[in-house]
C-alpha cells in the first residue's frame, strides 16, 4: 500500500539559519498577500481571476523591477504560497456550495491576509531535499540540524516536499513523503465502540479508558492566567508583547501535549481493533462554545476522527460513524430504552426501565458498539444504522481552521 505521510520534527537552527528561514516566510507571506489582493482586484473590476500560474509569472516580472530582495530566497517559497492561495479559494468555494445546499452552518471564511502579528508562519520547498539521521538538506538553506535523531525516514521513502514553520519562537520542519506500507494482515481482533469526552479522552466499550494527559490541566490553568496578564497590559507596549510571547509558548505546549496523546491513542486503537464505531460530531453546536477546555477538546475530536480514519486504513481497522442523532448517551445499553434528557453533569446513567446503573461514558461506548454487532447481523438496533466509512472529503474538512474557533 502506497501512502502519503508527513513527519514533523523540530529544527535546531543557528542565528544565520533563523534569519534565512524568517526571510523565506516573509517572501511566502508577501506573495500570498499580494496574490490575494490581485484576485480581489480582478474580481472587483470584472476581470478573469488569475490562477497561481498567472500570478507566479506576474510576480516574476515584478521581482525584476521592484522586489530585488526576493532573489535572496528560493523561488519555491513564493510559488508554493500562491498554490496555497489557490487551495484556500477552492476550500472557500466548496464551503459556499455546501452552504447553498444547507450543509454548512459555520462562517464561510473568505481567505484572509496573513499578518506577522499572528506568527511568522511557514513556507514550503520542493526539489532537491535530502534527509539524514540528524539533519535535513533544503534548497537555498543548506543542511539544517534536527533536535531529534533518527525520526525522519532516511530510507524507503520518496520525499515530495518540506514545510518549515515557526511556532512561538521554535522552528519545525514537516517532510512529506510517499512510502510503501505493508498491507494489513487480516486477523481476528475485537470490535469496540468509543465515546470521546473532555474528562476522559476516550472510553471503550470493553471498559478500558484512555485518560487525558495530566500536563494538560495545569497548562490550561496557566493559559488562563497568562491571557489575563495580556489583557491587563497596555496595547502596543513592550510588556504586552512579552506577555503575548509567553502566552503563545503556553498554547504551543498544550497543542503538543494534546497532539502526542491523540497520536498515541489512535495508533494503539487502530492496531488492536478490527472495527470501531465513533459518534458523529455536531459541528454547529460546537462552534458556539467559548469554554477553553471544551474548545480544545472539540478540536481534538476532529483530529481524533481524522487520525482514526487514515490509521484505520494503514492497520486494517474499519472506522464507522453512528448516525448524527443516534442517542448514544441517552439510550440504555442493557434494555434499549431511551431517556428524554441526560444532563451534561450527570456522570452515571441510571435506567428507569431495567435498573441498570453505569458510568455515563461506558454506557455510551456500549451503545456505539451495539451498532456494529446489529449492523453485521443485519438487524437495526435502534431503528438507526451505521454509516460505513468516512468519505475522503469529510476527512479534509476535519482539519480546516474554521473548527478551531470558539
Ligand atoms: Zn435499561
Image: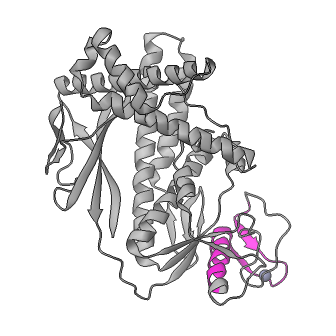
Which residue appears at 45% of the width and 70% of the height? Answer: 312
Count of numbered labels shown in the rendering: 0
The x and y percentages for residue 266 are 44, 64
Residue 278 placement, left or right of 180: right
The x and y percentages for residue 35 are 46, 24
Residue 149 drawn above or below residue 57? below
The x and y percentages for residue 384 are 75, 75
Region in magenta: 346-373
Which quadrant of the structure image shows residue 338?
Answer: bottom right
> What's the coloring here?
one colour
| 121 vs 97, nearest the viewer | 97
Residue 402 placement, left or right of 324: left
Q: In which of the image's four quarters is ligand 1 placed?
A: bottom right
Residue 176 drawn above or below residue 82? below
| 140 vs 370, nearest the viewer | 140
Which residue appears at 54% of the width and 36% of the height? Answer: 89
Residue 164 placement, left or right of 276: left
Point out the image quarter for the C terminus: top right
Camera sees residue 26: no
The x and y percentages for residue 16 are 17, 23
Q: Is residue 105 magenta?
A: no
Amino acid at each position: 500500500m502506497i501512502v502519503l505521510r508527513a513527519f514533523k520534527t523540530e529544527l535546531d537552527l543557528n542565528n544565520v539559519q533563523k534569519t534565512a528561514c524568517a526571510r523565506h516566510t516573509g517572501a511566502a507571506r508577501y506573495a500570498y498577500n499580494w496574490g490575494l489582493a490581485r484576485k480581489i482586484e480582478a474580481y472587483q473590476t470584472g476581470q478573469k481571476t488569475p490562477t497561481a500560474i498567472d500570478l507566479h509569472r506576474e510576480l516574476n516580472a515584478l521581482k525584476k523591477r521592484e522586489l530585488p530582495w526576493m532573489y535572496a530566497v528560493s523561488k519555491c517559497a513564493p510559488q508554493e504560497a500562491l498554490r496555497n492561495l489557490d487551495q484556500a479559494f477552492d476550500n472557500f468555494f466548496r464551503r459556499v456550495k455546501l452552504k447553498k445546499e444547507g450543509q454548512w452552518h459555520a462562517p464561510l471564511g473568505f481567505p484572509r491576509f496573513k499578518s506577522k502579528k499572528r506568527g511568522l508562519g511557514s513556507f514550503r520547498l520542493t526539489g532537491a531535499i535530502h534527509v539524514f539521521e540528524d539533519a535535513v538538506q533544503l534548497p537555498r538553506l543548506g543542511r539544517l540540524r534536527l533536535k531529534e535523531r533518527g525520526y525522519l525516514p532516511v530510507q524507503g521513502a520518496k520525499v515530495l516536499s518540506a514545510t518549515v514553520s515557526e511556532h512561538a519562537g521554535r522552528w519545525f520542519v514537516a517532510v512529506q513523503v510517499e512510502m510503501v506500507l505493508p498491507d494489513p494482515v487480516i486477523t481476528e481482533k475485537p470490535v469496540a465502540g468509543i465515546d470521546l469526552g473532555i474528562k476522559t479522552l476516550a472510553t471503550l466499550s470493553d471498559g478500558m479508558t484512555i485518560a487525558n494527559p495530566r500536563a494538560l490541566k495545569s497548562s490550561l490553568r496557566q493559559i488562563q492566567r497568562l491571557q489575563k496578564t495580556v489583557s491587563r497590559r497596555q496595547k502596543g507596549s513592550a510588556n504586552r508583547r512579552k506577555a503575548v510571547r509567553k502566552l503563545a509558548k503556553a498554547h504551543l505546549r498544550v497543542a503538543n501535549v494534546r497532539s502526542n496523546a491523540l497520536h498515541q491513542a489512535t495508533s494503539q486503537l487502530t492496531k488492536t481493533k478490527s472495527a470501531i464505531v465513533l459518534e458523529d460530531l455536531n459541528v454547529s453546536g460546537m462552534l458556539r462554545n467559548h469554554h477553553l477546555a471544551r474548545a480544545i477538546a472539540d478540536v481534538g475530536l476532529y483530529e481524533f476522527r481524522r487520525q482514526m480514519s487514515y490509521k484505520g486504513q494503514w492497520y486494517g481497522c474499519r472506522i464507522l460513524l453512528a448516525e448524527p442523532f443516534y442517542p448514544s448517551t441517552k439510550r440504555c445499553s442493557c434494555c434499549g430504552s431511551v431517556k428524554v434528557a441526560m444532563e451534561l453533569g450527570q456522570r452515571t446513567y441510571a435506567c428507569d426501565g431495567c435498573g441498570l446503573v453505569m458510568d455515563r461514558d461506558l454506557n455510551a461506548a456500549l451503545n456505539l458498539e451495539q451498532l456494529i454487532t446489529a449492523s453485521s447481523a443485519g438487524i437495526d438496533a435502534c431503528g438507526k444504522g451505521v454509516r460505513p466509512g468516512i468519505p475522503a472529503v469529510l476527512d479534509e474538512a476535519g482539519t480546516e481552521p474554521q473548527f478551531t474557533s470558539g
